[in-house]
Image: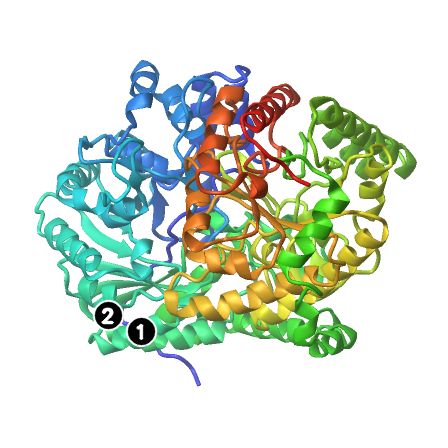
């Protein structure tokens, strides 16, 4: 049956696009600026060139309305703080002296001034800089960046739509500034913020904006009646403005829920909704509120967060249903394409047939364009595209990569006993303390040490054939020897091998497990200039051979102190990969857990006394709606226990988490049944320690005393002060001393100084305590 064309030509659009460039030109330019090798003018020229290139790529792909304002040197929420004048008092002098340097000081801190706190952007692996607000905050409009980028695009002949973080989401993402009462609610500043947004909207209209997009993803989360009333007031007032462009309010990452009725009734001209699997309920909800008569609907039917090709027929069915629910329907990705790599066609090492299953940002823009054409002109206009799409979907479904009977038989045989330690924590902790013989307030690191230029060069030399495997391994051994010697000299208590052989904490393991595909150019921004290459979890997972035992054992041979084995946990292996979408996540997690369980067993058999299984993504992957939490946490905690529960009582299991809000998953942290947990705490001033204490957490914990995402070297006094704050919540016999996270991104000079100060702080505080470990 041939679909009928839409009444009006559908626009093809996106909410945002990858910023880095094909060869991560932005990262190189920004880091060059920080090091004094790139001038401010050259940095701005690089940024302008990347924007022009992005817009041209979008136009050539058939995107008829491009976004502006989504480009950022570091973070779009930080850009919003600048736009509304919400600069923390400690950074105002730096911003006034030099806007660019002050901007980066807010993001990264300086030796003398702490940066803004950083945390996850909803349930993605992108990090944003948390706005700091208080009752005395004064907002002032600074639309310069947004206006300039709009004018750039219009001058090049593009139809452009500025994209701003909406005022409600901005306030709901904010936290009380230091010194402000912790129960202060930033949303109470809405009436103060809305006039500033009105000024920005007026400036964008004067610059030629036909539409302006206001992103409100916070409204897909559970919201109180007061917060929903704030959203209603915000868009009633902004919609009533006369000096503005037409407004498109966009939500993504899930179901809009109660906020849909509010926004549908508001005087804005358009809504953007997610209609992929995560937001499928929006279709029924939209019908239940009577649709959007007289309004524009931007339909997010292409998944902006994953990398699998779109099912054209399924999307066209959804779009056809939506035609009767709005004045006009346009086609988009479900969210910004910031969350996917740039171009799948660059992946020459992936089998060509498998590569046809993949859609990165460039491929997604073509999918959006095809769907918009099919919606506007009917399916006869895209016959060839539909046929190719059906063939590619069938190829994936029938592939042996996606179905390994041995793996499925093993996961089907899992029992409850496989996920339980042989003894409860209260009994096994005595055996662990006797085996390890650690002092009060033991010191350790999270795992990785600096990834030097020499290490990266060694990996490049191996790939290029300039050195052989023996030569590469000699370099790795030399690095491990240096790392172990430094830790012993510094006085750390539990050592690590430093992970010099690992390119990334997920990719390293993915390259050694069946069912994963590694990319060469699939870079995605995690924060600032930190980019990662998430592997593609394409099929059933198993472990052909040990992955970490050799290097951990080598490090242990160099010291009498205990050395931790380091693994990445199953939830994080999923969260920081592009995970398959053809089976439930819990099934995939169990497969990964069994592969890691084999590795844990081999580490223990090799004599490793401490094994750390990192799960920094446990909170990140928590569904945005509370109703979905229990089902997720059930399989997430089960998969961790399945990984770790086969060890002896005297083998100590650690886990690590960082840069997330932990308060609402403390019970899940408890349910992991790990012996020791280390968590990010430096920027949040030990908040997590207080949350653990409030919950009644009885295991050992190491809330971080060094913020490793800032170049600032903490003094021994700084670390000791945080440690004493931690002791107010966690007893000394259960408190560990460690950095917030791994040291991969830090240089050796700051690493040496910071760890020496950390050990000195532990000794100072330890000396002031009585008693110790037996």
Q: Position of residue 609 (x, y in %)?
A: 77, 47
Which one is nearer the viewer's eye here, 366 or 429? 429
Q: Is residue 560 visible?
A: yes
Label 2 CA crowd tier, 10 Å (few <14, some 14–19, many 20+): many
Report which residue position mark 2 lands on: 326
Q: Nearer the viewer, residue 255 or 491?
A: 491
The quarter in which the N terminus is drawn is bottom left
x then y, percent, for residue 273 = 33, 63
- Which residue is at 38% across, 65% downward? 626
Give residue 566's position: percent from left, percent from top: 71, 46
Q: Position of residue 35 (x, y in %)?
A: 54, 18
- Does residue 218 appear left or right of residue 521 in this picture? left
Look at the picture and state if 231 lies above or below 731. Answer: below
Residue in view at x 34 percent, y 51 percent: 65
Left or right side of 493 for 692: left
Confirm whether residue 566 shows in the render.
Answer: no
Indicate the quadrant containing the C terminus: top left, top right, bottom left or bottom right. top right
The answer to the question of whether label 1 and label 2 lie on touching residues, with beta carbons closer than 8 A, is: yes
Q: Nearer the viewer, residue 140 or 773?
A: 773
**From what the image shows, is residue 678 above or below residue 228?**
above
Where disc 2 sits, the SS reads strand
Indicate which disc residue 322 carries. 1
Q: Along the horizontal axis of the image, is 509 left or right of 440?
A: right
- Specify the quadrant of the image occupied by residue 530: top right
How far, Cα to Cα, is label 1 from label 2? Answer: 7 Å
Crowd tier of the residue under label 1, counting other residues whose Cα lies within 10 Å: few below 14, some 14–19, many 20 or above:
many
Relative vertical location of residue 741 with respect to residue 667 in this rendering, above or below: above
């Amino acid at each position: 049956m041939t679909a009928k064309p839409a009444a009006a030509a559908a626009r093809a659009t996106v909410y945002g696009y990858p910023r880095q460039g094909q060869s991560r030109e932005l990262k190189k330019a920004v880091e060059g600026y920080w090091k004094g090798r790139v001038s401010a003018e050259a940095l701005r020229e690089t940024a302008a060139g990347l924007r022009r290139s992005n817009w041209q790529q979008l136009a050539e792909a058939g995107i008829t309305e491009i976004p502006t304002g989504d480009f950022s040197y570091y973070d779009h929420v930080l850009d919003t703080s600048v736009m509304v004048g919400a600069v923390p008092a400690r950074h105002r002098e730096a911003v006034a002296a030099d806007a660019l340097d002050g901007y980066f000081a807010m993001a990264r801190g300086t030796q003398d001034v702490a940066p803004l706190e950083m945390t996850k952007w909803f349930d993605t692996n992108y990090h944003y800089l948390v706005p700091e607000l208080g009752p005395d905050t004064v907002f002032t409009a600074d639309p310069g960046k947004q206006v300039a980028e709009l004018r750039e695009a219009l001058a090049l002949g593009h139809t452009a739509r500025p994209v701003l973080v909406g005022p409600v989401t901005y306030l709901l993402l904010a936290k009380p500034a230091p010194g402000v009462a912790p129960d202060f609610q930033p949303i109470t500043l809405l009436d103060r913020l809305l006039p500033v947004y009105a000024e920005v909207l007026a400036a964008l209209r004067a610059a030629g904006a036909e539409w302006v997009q206001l992103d409100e993803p916070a409204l897909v989360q559970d919201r109180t009646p007061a917060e929903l009333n704030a959203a209603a007031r915000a868009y009633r007032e902004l919609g009533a403005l006369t000096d503005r462009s037409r407004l498109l309010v966009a939500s993504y990452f899930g179901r809009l829920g109660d906020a849909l009725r509010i926004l549908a009734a508001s005087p804005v001209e358009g809504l953007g909704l997610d209609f992929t699997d995560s937001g499928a309920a929006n279709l029924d909800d939209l019908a239940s509120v009577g649709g959007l008569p007289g309004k524009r609907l931007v339909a997010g039917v292409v998944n902006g967060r994953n990398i699998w090709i779109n099912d054209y027929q399924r999307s066209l069915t959804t779009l056809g249903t939506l035609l009767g629910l709005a004045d006009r329907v346009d086609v988009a990705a479900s969210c910004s394409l910031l969350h996917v790599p740039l171009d799948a066609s660059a992946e020459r090492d992936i089998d060509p047939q498998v590569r046809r299953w993949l859609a990165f940002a460039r491929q997604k823009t073509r999918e959006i364009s095809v769907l918009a054409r099919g919606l506007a002109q009917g399916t006869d206009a895209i016959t060839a595209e539909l046929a190719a799409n059906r063939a590619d979907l069938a190829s994936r479904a029938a592939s042996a990569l996606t179905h390994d009977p041995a793996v499925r038989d093993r996961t089907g045989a899992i029992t409850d006993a496989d996920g339980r330690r042989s003894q409860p924590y209260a009994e096994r902790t005595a055996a662990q303390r006797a085996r390890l013989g650690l002092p009060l307030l033991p010191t350790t690191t999270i795992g990785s040490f600096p990834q030097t230029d020499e290490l990266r060069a060694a990996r490049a030399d191996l790939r290029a054939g300039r050195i052989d495997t023996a030569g590469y391994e000699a370099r790795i051994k030399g690095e491990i020897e240096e790392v172990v010697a430094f830790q012993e000299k510094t006085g750390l208590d539990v050592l690590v091998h430093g992970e010099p052989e690992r390119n990334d904490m997920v990719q390293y393991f993915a390259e050694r497990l069946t069912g994963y595909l590694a990319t060469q150019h699939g870079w995605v921004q995690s924060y600032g200039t930190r980019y990662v290459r998430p592997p593609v979890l394409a099929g059933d997972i198993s472990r052909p051979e040990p992955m970490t035992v050799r290097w951990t054992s080598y490090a242990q041979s160099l010291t009498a102190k205990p050395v931790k084995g380091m693994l990445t946990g199953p939830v994080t292996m999923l969260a920081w990969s592009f995970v398959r979408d053809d089976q439930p996540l819990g099934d995939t997690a169990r497969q990964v857990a069994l592969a890691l369980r084999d590795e844990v067993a081999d580490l223990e058999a090799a004599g490793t006394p401490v094994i750390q299984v990192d799960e920094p993504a446990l909170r990140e992957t928590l569904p945005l709606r509370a109703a979905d939490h229990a089902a997720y946490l059930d399989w997430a905690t089960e998969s961790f226990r399945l990984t770790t529960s086969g060890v002896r009582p005297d083998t100590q299991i650690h886990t690590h988490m960082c840069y997330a809000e932990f308060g609402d998953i403390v019970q899940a942290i408890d349910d992991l049944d790990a012996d020791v947990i280390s968590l990010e705490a430096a920027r949040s001033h030990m908040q997590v320690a207080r949350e653990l204490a409030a919950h009644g957490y009885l295991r050992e914990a190491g809330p971080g005393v060094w913020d490793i995402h800032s170049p600032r070297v903490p003094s021994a006094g700084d670390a000791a002060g945080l440690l004493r704050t931690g002791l107010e919540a966690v007893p000394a016999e259960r408190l560990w001393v460690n950095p917030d996270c791994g040291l991969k991104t830090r240089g050796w000079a700051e690493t040496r100084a910071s760890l020496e100060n950390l050990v000195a702080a532990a000794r100072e505080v330890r000396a002031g305590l009585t008693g110790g470990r037996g």
